[in-house]
Image: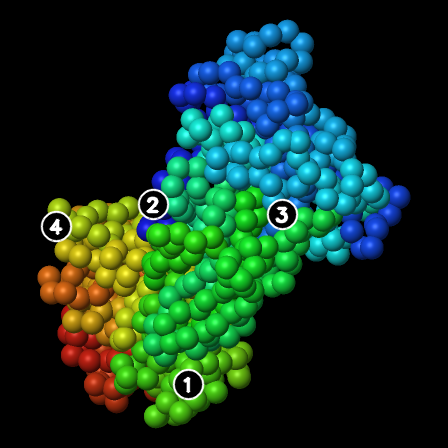
Amino acid sequence: MKKRQLWSLMVVGVISAMAVPATSLAGPDVIVGDLPDVWHWTSSGAINGMRAYSVATTSCNIGDQEFSWVELTNKHPVICQNMYRLSNGRIEQIGMSWLKHGFCALQGTICGSCTPAGSGCVDALGVGCSDPYSSNLNGTQTRLGPRFEVDPTKGFFPFPFSNPGGTTGNNLFKRLQVPESDLTTPSALYFVEGQYIHQEDASAGNGNNNASYRRITINGSFSITTQGSTEREKPAIYAWRDHGNGVNNPDNSVLIEPVDFGTGDRFIAASKVTDLGGGIWHYEYAVHNLNSDRAAGTVSVPIIPGTAVTNVGFHDIDYHSGEPYDNTDWSSTVTSSEVVWTSPQTFAQNPNSNALRWGTMYNFYFDANIPPVPGDLSITSFKPSSSPTRTATLEVPGGESPDCNNNGIDDPCDTSCAAAGCSGVPGCGLSSDCNANSVPDECEADCDHNGLADTCDIAATPSLDCNLNSILDICEPDCDHNGVPNDCETNSNIAFSDDFESDMGWTVTNDASLTTGAWERADPEQTNRPGGICQPPDDHSPSGTLCYVTEAAAGASAGSFDVDGGPTVLTSPAIDASSGGATLEFWYWFFSETGDAMTLEASGNNGANWTPVVIFSASASSWQSYSVLLDDYITPGSQTRFRLSVVDDGSSSYTEAAIDDVVVSVADCPPATGDYDSDGHIDLRDYAAFQLCFEGPAGNQCGAAFDYQVDGTVDGTDFSVWTNGITGP
């Protein structure tokens, strides 16, 4: 249900703007305009567990000058083909090919108006023109050259290109090779990518838009069908975000940022952080070398002291068919300040060591007990450089762990010394955690004050929650005092219910002083302070996603988007509660470090008058239940409303609020008559019974005959009402 912050969305917006198809650029500018189909070369069966493919590519010149396409010199493009798999929150490169060498260009129009460089298949591609290479042609082995000879930053390669291993081989040789086992992952999405390299394009500074991707599906015989449309000028790493939550369903928690060492010398880095629960987060990174000849030999992620790092991993793609590069995996090291992955050898030790070279993408990942904050992933070049390191601002461990009871011990350590990073922590394991959610029970809703979270009481004895709303029955309004909550009475009716998964007409009004933290219907994003979790990680509804929360744009830091100024006021739609016995129930989250408050008010006349009901000032880092009989405060009518106001006191405080799962029920409770002996008169004979109940509970002894206020107690107010109704001697 999780997902991440306005800061993330700002980054996404910037990157999206950079990735959209460009207008005409100065000089020649080649892009991949289409990836129409894929040829399957191993249709008779896998060879040594591998499948082989080639991808059709149609190039376009979107620049303002034609460029050369000469077969017998190095003034023609080379074309690489790759395959990727997206599964379980990770995108991996699973296949790569050698390079198809172009030989002449047709003058098509798939990218718009074409000014042809000639007729037929000629030695240049005209302005606005396109040239198709079929999938079969792009797999012709005699035209496939190695990657190692190409400088992608300059677009240069020697001619004639070399053929280590010969010009022909089996059906795998030089083609896009993919392990068959990588093509059978349940529910995975798959993508192919094409990229052109040309020295005139690179010289014009237009080499950063030369890769495009397209989604594919794979059938039972491992043949491929293209799906959707080609995502022009977007390398396949962008599919991680574009399809991260399913086909065409973006995952905006994936952050993507280009990293430039110079013109046409680009890497693209991306991250996704997943809250695994129990105080552990999974950090997933991908780095794609788009066109950097310098390659990368080191990738590192900073951590803060005390971070417990586990499950460190790495994934790359293997070279094949005689490429000289080593395929040994990178090693990883965890220090007190960073997690580092390095190539097996330096450039000085072995220029052919496994570096992150152009047209490839590597994965780096680990788990940690520290939540994410914006931070810099570092990429260090493999080849020697006077300025060898660049950074990408993604998400890294660095947030403050929650401490809901403010005792100086992180919540997971409060509940268990065996939690990650908690061994040897003084005072660890002293808090009970009946529902094993790594939150001490003392921080959770406990309306009956028995020391156990209400959810655990109900789990042990489900009958304690007759309406299955996770609130103990003894804590809910019971207007006729029979031990059965109003919601569970047979004559009780739900007047209004909202889990906020759809818009039911709530309104938000903000004071002019409010700068951040306005109420909004959104998926909340967790932030942390030493005093606990500020904004919740999820809504309250088990099967839902949305709630009303004070600006779900957290993540940069706990105080970046909390309530500042205000108030911000959330008002319900009008509710018909005119039949009386109106019970309002909801779940709320309120966190404050300096005594800020959230106020609940109710109105029975469509907001003409508002009556304060309760002020929430106790800070808690968990969802809390609340219920109230509105009849105790207002006369509910057909236009009953309630509202929640949150305000910051002006100090440097952290204030967050949320509300979810609202229910208003009405119960036809028998009205107080004062006629205890049911003889048709309110008289002195009834007074004898009244004396027995006065200033006491309206229980079995008195029934509800004298509880005019329906508040569970017979008191002086009820006595005044009774005396005004005397009808007999």
Mark 2: amino acid: Met
Earlier residue among tags 4 and 2:
2
Image quadrant in which you'd find residue 453: bottom left
**Which secondary structure, mark 1?**
loop
Which residue is tagged 4? 513
Earlier residue among tags 3 and 2:
2
Report, in whole angstroms, how far the alpha carbon at label 2 lies from the one at label 1: 35 Å
**Which secondary structure, mark 4?**
loop
Q: Residue 554: which disc?
A: none
Mark 4 surroundings: few (<14), some (14-19) or many (≥20) residues within 10 A: few
Report, in whole angstroms, how far the alpha carbon at label 4 lies from the one at label 3: 49 Å
The reply to whether dot 3 and dot 1 touch (C-beta < 8 Å) is no
Please say if 460 is above or below 113.
below
Which residue is tagged 3? 84
Q: Residue 422: which disc?
A: 1
**Which secondary structure, mark 3?**
strand
Discs 3/1, front: 3
Q: Is 531 positioned to the left or the right of 230 in the image?
A: left
